[in-house]
Amino acid sequence: KKIIVVTFGTKQSSYIEQIIQKSSLDQPLINQKYTSGDLIISNLENVQGNESDLVILSVTYGKDQSNNFKNNFGPLLMYGGINRLNVAITRAKDKMIVVKSFMVNSSTGFVNCSTNPSKPFASDLETLSI
């Protein structure tokens, strides 16, 4: 089965690829899927054209060095961002898993962002437990 991991930014997708490459000896099945093209790491902006049995959507962010939540949701909050999200969630043939690292509330800035065209997505994230 083919798997796509979709991140909201290129830094995160690069980081995940680095982890996979570093763990190739410890995780031979993951390494085999990655090297054969059955495991693809992509970001929201370039996932179009790919399709897989399973999509893992990584919505993971954290606090910066000043302990402030980094509410930079990359292309999602830009013009056309909701279309990119729609493309990402329609890449799965069988199943989608959403991985998130935060609670959606006013402290994240995600729900209250006045330019946020994706408030329904924020609402869905809010109902998911960590």
Image (cartoon, helix red, strand yellow):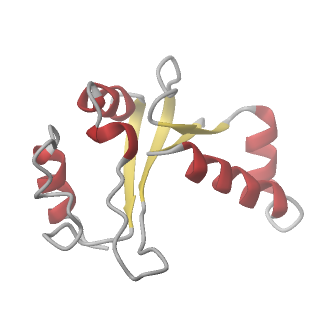
Q: Residue at coordinates 48% horizontally, 41% vertically from top-left?
A: 54
Tell which residue pokes out farthest to the top in this image: 49
Which one is in front, 1 or 127?
127
18 relative to 62, above or below = above
Tell which residue pokes out farthest to the bottom in this image: 67
Q: Residue at coordinates 13% horizontally, 58% vertically from top-left?
A: 111
In the picture provided, is 58 more to the left or to the right than 34? Answer: left
* Figure disc tally: 0
Which one is in front, 61 or 95?
61
26 relative to 39, above or below = below
Residue 46, position as x, y percentages in the image: 52, 26
91 relative to 124, above or below = above
Which one is in front, 65 or 81?
65
Residue 18, position as x, y percentages in the image: 75, 55
Q: Quadrant of residue 34?
A: top right
Q: Residue at coordinates 57% horizontally, 43% vertically from top-left?
A: 10
In the picture provided, is 16 more to the left or to the right than 5? Answer: right
Q: Residue at coordinates 20% horizontally, 63% vertically from top-left?
A: 109
**In which quadrant will I find the C terminus?**
bottom left
Tell which residue pokes out farthest to the right in this image: 25
Q: Quadrant of residue 77?
A: top left
**In which quadrant will I find the N terminus?**
top right
In the picture provided, is 14 more to the left or to the right than 5? Answer: right
Residue 48, position as x, y percentages in the image: 47, 21
In the picture provided, is 92 more to the left or to the right than 71? Answer: right
Residue 66, position as x, y percentages in the image: 42, 81
